[in-house]
Image (cartoon, helix red, strand yellow):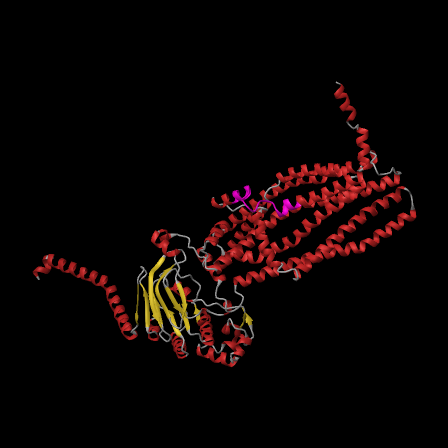
Amino acid sequence: MATLSTMRQNLPTLKELTAHYVRHRPQIQRLITTSFVLYVVGTSYNAFIRPGSATGPSKSSRRSKKDGVDGRPARVEVDAVFYARLKRLLRIVIPSIRSKEALLLAMHSAFLVFRTVLSLYVADLDGKIVSSLVRAQTVPFLWNILRWLLVAIPATYTNSMLGFIQNKLAIAYRTRLTEAVMDQYLGKDAKDEAKVFYKMIKNPDQKRVAADVKVLGSWFFPWLFRMITVDINRFSTSLAAIYGNVAKPVLDVILYNYQLSRNVGAEGLVLLTIGVQASAALLRALTPPFGNYAATEAALSGQLRHSHSRLVEASEEVAFYGGEQVEKYIIERDYFALVKHINRVLRMRVWHGIVEEGIIKWLWGSLGLCICAIPVFFKIPGIAANDLGARTESFVTNRRLLLSASDAFGRVMYSYKELSELAGYTARVAQLFDTMSDVRQGKFDKQLVSSASIDENARVLKGRGSVTDGEDIEFTNVPIVSPNGDILVRSLSFHVKPGQHLLIVGPNGCGKSSLFRILGGLWPVYGGTVRKPPAEDFTYIPQRPYLSLGTLRDQIIYPHSKAQMERRGMSDHDLYNILAVVGMEDIVEREGGWDVAKEWRDALSGGDKQRIAMARLFYHEPKYAILDECTSAVPLDIERTMFEHATSLGITLLTVSHRPSLWQYHQLILQYDGQGGYVFTELDAERRLALQEEKQLLEQKLLAVPKMKQRLAELKALREDRAQSPIIAAA
């Protein structure tokens, strides 16, 4: 007992502890404030910069992968994957610290800090104005009002400049991203032969693109247009706003609470932080995945636009078939799917908003009022007692600081939701760059459908051939593959020299178009060896030629400009002579001159479009021309003139046509049988025409055989009737 009594006497009393705390309070205050700043910075870093471990998949990452495997859209979250994507895109939008974007970001940061300093000054000024009112001091009150009006000048300028710089940042980001996409999509210069835009639109069969199609819809190219236009814009706007929505609130939380700790003591700051963090953890647990919902809404909106665009493109066919109700059902289905998703998200936002406002505004506000009342009801060591005016000034200033800190912390919480939406836009833009990169690197991997499910065909589709440059066109054991993975010709071999015009014939779907795509460098070679001239030595003229937006002159010289035409030594008079060859010299006067701009695909008939395309061929004079039924709407006499002029220019023709009148202009023929076989041989036009005429004569005779058989049967029946008649027999 004596020992316990001695120990109790040696223990410091509460009074002694309080006295010790008062003596060392300044050092303790600095320690608590420093710890608070480090805590806010560390919490912000863990919440926004390092949400998950980069070394291993998080729970959300594993769940996202699982969702992808099950065929559902992968969940977009603020995780290590998001920051890896964002880091890649930031290298594009801010290429260096000396770039315009970095300068704008520095200016934006300076204005953000300056606005926070102004807010601290205004909070102190509020307290002084109310204090002068309570004390009934007229001159200090008017002086403080004048100071209030004067501080409005830099405050309004700062707020306006923040909005202006943020918009400029969004435009700068969008410009950088659009330039990077266009360099990948359409090439940096005319020598770029990757043709990414064609392969992504016409040949979306890579694994990555196929996966995107599975997520986004049955057609990829409408989503591609949306990614390039809408999604890049939304990403740029969100990225420009997220910096101010994250950096500014974090800075405000630190500065406001630092000033508040000096006014009411760091002890109250600790209690406030504990309460805020507990409620914030509850709010975060109740926050739905708005980033994933934003990506889904964008996808559904794109699907609705695609349904409308399909109807516009095929309006004539739908009108002929009377398919209005079917198309109406499709559009309404896509619309109500979008509305259903939006309503679901709105319902979630209502309940989330109720909980969020209740916690952030009302719960935190009540905690703040209690903190502001500490100097009034309790004596704080180191702070002298004040009169009514001083207490009122202190309370108003602290309340203003606390409201600002609460608003800043609320914006930090809101910014996580905005960061989730940014994650959705980031995923789509990064997905676009990944897909274009894979296409440019030739990472084709056919989706095995139809006959491609056969193991032997699958092996062919995984193979790769070689392509070499040369003056001739030579295919050696090259498989011809359709877009859906069918092997149309297992091994194609032929050789065409310059000046040897090739006629290509065969039924639909036999591989003629696939052959042309390989020659144009648009299609992968799945095996064998292809030797061909570079792509710029080819000109492709389809049955429905492309007419660009521009003048009449632009239609003939496309893709050249007027300056490029003049550098070639060509003039409008030369173009007029070319039009005379195709029988369209009157179009210049009829349409109003060379510089008239129209929507030429609507202004010209099908035959006129084909003539313009042939005029374009004669202007460029390539080494090889691929003519795919390009004169089907042209009269025979004009067609004959066109082919004679093309051969006189030394253009080697690779023609797809079923008109016998064109056989005489070709020396070789490649004929597909539609069953995987082909014949490549010399073309004897006269003998083939004679055989064709004989074939047509035999076909006419064969058509008459059923009628002759029927007539023969009638005559036999008549003879039998006469033989059986007794009157005829007696006679």
In this rendering, does residue 592 appear at all? no
Q: Quadrant of residue 203?
A: bottom left
Q: Position of residue 446 (x, y in %)?
A: 42, 55
Along the line of sight, the residue nearer the viewer: 128 or 25: 25
> Is 525 positioned to the left or the right of 140 in the image?
left
**Furthest residue in direction left, as rendered:** 730
Q: Quadrant of residue 36?
A: top right
How many marks on residues?
Answer: 0
Along the line of sight, the residue nearer the viewer: 283 or 2: 2
Q: Position of residue 46 (x, y in %)?
A: 63, 44
Q: Quadrant of the N terminus?
A: top right
> Is 41 positioned to the left or the right of 541 in the image?
right
Instruction: Tell me if residue 617 is in the magenta stretch.
Output: no
Q: Quadrant of the C terminus?
A: bottom left
Residue at x 73%, y 57% (from the top left corner): 161
Q: Position of residue 181 (x, y in %)?
A: 55, 60
Q: Quadrant of residue 267?
A: top right
Q: Position of residue 414 (x, y in %)?
A: 66, 45
**Furthest residue in direction top, as rendered:** 1
Along the line of sight, the residue nearer the viewer: 489 or 716: 489
In this rendering, does residue 198 appear at all? yes
> Is 685 positioned to the left or the right of 303 in the image?
left
Along the line of sight, the residue nearer the viewer: 22 or 661: 22
Q: Is residue 714 above or below residue 19?
A: below
Residue extent of the magenta highlight:
44-64
Instruction: Tell me if residue 54 is in the magenta stretch.
Output: yes
